[in-house]
Image (tube, rainbow, N blue to C red):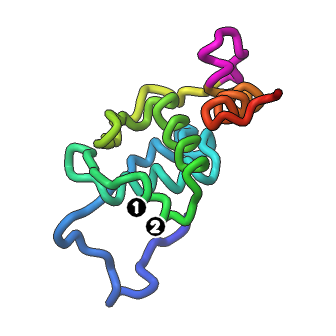
Amino acid sequence: MIEKAPLCPERIRKIAGSFAFIEHRFLRDGFFSNLNRNEVLLYLFLVLVSDRTGLSYYSYDRICTILRICTDEYIEARNALIEKDLIAFDGRVFQVLSLPEIPVVGDPKLLKTEEDMARRDPATVHQIIVNAIGEGCD
């Protein structure tokens, strides 16, 4: 058995002031491995900046700047964390949620409705943008 002794006893961590935590279940039960790089980055950031109830108020542009990700990467990561039931978001405030019983694994969703197409089909999104700025096909 490995004997556990601090490598630098003069530098043992102490809880002083605010403190963030992530349950061991996050790693042990597969939540971590169910996230991509940007999802992990955003989740850890939200854990670090949230208060004791999990709330944080950072704007998307500030988050993108701090994490060095673009808006598209932020939106994809945020939406995935919501779908995986790890965070809640009301458009202004984030809440890091208690972990669900088991990781929510998202199956690739088929695009069936016009709303699905408008949100996730690149050609449809392109068409919406082009039509909005008035540069459609003549």
- What's the residue type where badge 1 is placed? Arg
Task: Using the numbered discs, state the Cα–Cα distance from disc 1 to disc 2 in whole angstroms.
Answer: 6 Å
8 sits to left or right of 37: left
Residue contact between numbered discs 1 and 2, judged by CB atoms under 8 Å = yes
Residue 104, by quadrant, is top right
Name the secondary structure under disc 2: helix
- The residue drawn where x is 75% and y is 30% is 136
Q: Position of residue 105 (x, y in %)?
A: 60, 27
Asked if residue 25 is positioned above or below residue 22 in the image, the reply reads above
38 sits to left or right of 47: right
> What are the residue bounds of the magenta stretch?
107-118
- The residue drawn where x is 63% and y is 37% is 133
Residue indicated by mark 2: 66
The label on residue 97 is: none
Q: Position of residue 125 (x, y in %)?
A: 68, 30
Q: Nearer the viewer, mark 1 or mark 2?
A: 1
